[in-house]
Amino acid sequence: MSTEILMPALSPTMTEGNLSKWLIKKGDTVKAGDLIAEIETDKATMEVEAVDEGVVLDLLFKEGEANIPVNKAIAIIGDPNEKVEVKKESPNEKVIEEKKIEKNIETKIENKKADIIDTPLPKIEEDRNLTSEEITMRQALRDTMAEEMRKDNKVFILGEEVAEYQGAYKVTQGLLQEFGKERVLDTPISEHGFTGLAVGAAFKGLKPILEFMTFNFSMQAIDQIINSAAKTLYMSGGQINCPIVFRGPNGAAAQVAAQHSQDFSSWYSQVPGLKVIAPSTPYNAKGLLRSAISDPNPVIFLENEILYGLKGPVNNDVNFSIPIGKANIEKEGKDLTIVTYSIMLQKSKEAALRLKEEYNLDAEIIDLQTLRPLDTETILNSVKKTNRLITVEESWPFGSVGSEIVNIIQRDAFDYLDSPVIKVNSADVPMPYALSLEKLYLPQVDDIINAAKKVSYIK
Amino acid sequence: MKKLQKADYIKMYSFMLKIRRFEERAAQLYGMGKIGGFCHLYIGQEAVVVGILMTIDKNDSVVTTYRDHGHMIARGLDPKRIMAELTGREDGYSAGKGGSMHMFSKENNFYGGHGIVGAQVPIGTGIAFTHKYNGEKNICRTYIGDGAMNNGQVFEAFNLASLWKLPVLYIIENNKYGMGTSVDRAAAGLDLYKRGEAFGIPGEKVDGMNVFSVIEAADKAGKYVREGNGPYIIEVQTYRYRGHSMSDPAKYRTKEELDNYKQTDPIEIVKAEILKKKIATNDEIEKINKDTLEEIKNAAEFATNSPFPKDSELYTDVYL
């Protein structure tokens, strides 16, 4: 059987080439791997090797011939005793056909909504297992990690100062003593390295909880978080998942200035493959962290340093969890909707009290709890009821979680709106150090009140 | 040193040849527009992975770079499904979603196929961490290109591996060029394996064109790591005959340099040894050649006939 040797594409963009030199002649016996020709492309001259074996029956182009299309037969090899048969369908047409198919795939794609677990959300006021004693967010996080480590030997924690120092913010206090140094590991200050290591451990079946001393340092490791942890399940066709929790304080603390105050909520929420959680109370921190540790996917768990000392009741059931992807209606209201998360929940609640007292406005507050997948249904239902929306978050304004919510609302609830949506964000500058400027940078209760007045057309 | 049986010689020769024929066929399919994107060939480096393979335990793990086709073949994976991934079809190892650089086989403990230079090094170290954490006697072989040896996370991983005595065998495949930049223009100090010394990691340099040297070093290093002594580095001196990727004409090196290496072709070395030792006759070798060519031809056929992934696959495998 004879085989055609085709003009090869030697780069993704090459469409034709020049035959600068033949390295074989008619009658030669060619073996796989033998050099057969030199081809000049728009970029370079390259040697071409034979893949098939046989005797050169014909050279279809002369040396020096130019602009030969890719996939055009340039030589024929085969058994000299057999007749040369010429194929009717040129491979070139086949390629074009395939490209067409690809194009069709592109145009047919519909934007599918991320799955949101259909479990009812526990209501703190209706929770019968609520403790009478109040504990801090710090304790709630620690207790949940300890509970999960007792249940599952695959869960371990690593990070800077998590073991002997007991945690830079004391979130891992006592874990080393209970679980030992095999499961509570102090790492050197090398985020890129230990994040990659933890991702590898998760690929192989462990369930690491990785503490970033603060999320600012996750930028050192972001390639491993996104390129490795978030994408590998997809790239492996569903074979290799990465059950890991990246947790630590996110956003501003107090006067630690530009490099230690960044909010990463929208950065990570942009990435398919990651789930992103931002708890606001000890109660939901417990329920959400348990879900995060049990989840087979990589989860970004954004805590807040200022909230570590926040006290509140919790549910002490070691199986209590809050589903990922569900927002909580923190306070019901009828006049406008405030969508917020993390530390801004506290400021939003304060603003809602004053809005009621000073302007008789009844605000509904939605605490997102999970940023990705986003609970759009809860937001939409609320806006359809109140017809007015503000978003409140610590993130920078450009492309923030609020920006995405604005997009969803204008697309799916345009006719329900009585006023434009207003976003309340931090200032669009690096975080300043000075106390006065820091206050100005961060969203304050007055900013929320002003936004609420504006969407309500109150002067 | 591991005592090589007659069957081992045949196995080595067959695997190395299979890799070469596979890569040549991949180049052809690339030229025909059947394979897209980036495509990095392993031609010239076959002795490295096949030599290391000869010392591997079934439950050991492997993680490597984007020059991974040969690594998968050496791991015993199916050339049909590897080629089908290169053509982006549903029968590919990643169901057409990974491509040449991102292929995995969890059931065979093959953890990729990583597209970011250096990223596989902490990951392999973490897989080794898991072997130790689980109390398994297995080790993780982590391949590193010479280019990645100037990448910071590699040293972070070395430090952690040595600090925690992790069962990881690092194999530096020094093919002399990181894309178009030669090692001596990229790395200060020539012996890359010595970079482990600062972390207390022993290592050595090996001729990677000679599979027998590779086996000897891999055997020794593998034992060291498996016995719980911590990591070890083998720097294998090798050479890629082709450019960095398909579109690289390799103008940064001379033809003489390439021809020089071809004089010590790794496959020819094994073949000569087989004939010298009378392990197989010329005819038997010819039969292997023919069968290999046929097998790879069938793989290409399979890979071009396998269907494209279904549209509905776009949104699968992103969350478990």
Image (cartoon, coloured by chain):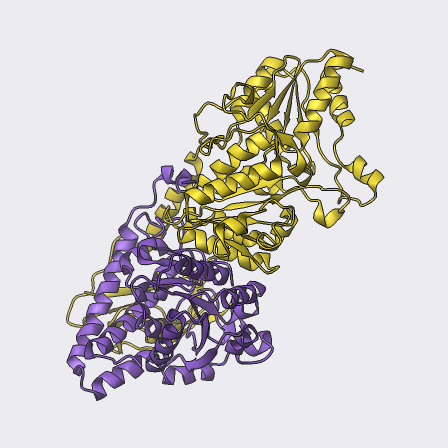
Seen in the picture, residue A406 relative to A303 is either above or below; the reply is above
In the rendered structure, the answer to whether residue A357 lies left or right of residue A57 reads right
Q: Residue furthest bottom?
A: B276
Seen in the picture, residue B132 relative to A338 is either above or below; the reply is below
Seen in the picture, residue B189 relative to A205 is either above or below; the reply is below
Q: Name the residue nearer the viewer: A321 or B204.
A: A321
In the rendered structure, the answer to whether residue B283 lies left or right of residue A445 reads left
Quadrant in which the C terminus of chain B is drawn: top left
Q: Is residue A274 visible?
A: no
Rendering coords of residue A164 (x, y %): 59, 55
Seen in the picture, residue A459 relative to B201 is either above or below; the reply is above
The part of the image, by quadrant, that contains residue A404 is top right
Rendering coords of residue A218 (x, y %): 60, 50
Q: Name the residue nearer the viewer: B155 or A231.
A: B155
The part of the image, by quadrant, that contains residue B19 is bottom left
Q: Is residue A355 visible?
A: yes
Which colour represents chain B?
Answer: purple
Residue sitting at 44 percent across and 54 percent down? Answer: A201
Which colour represents chain A?
Answer: yellow
Rendering coords of residue A267 (x, y %): 60, 42
The part of the image, by quadrant, that contains residue A349 is top right
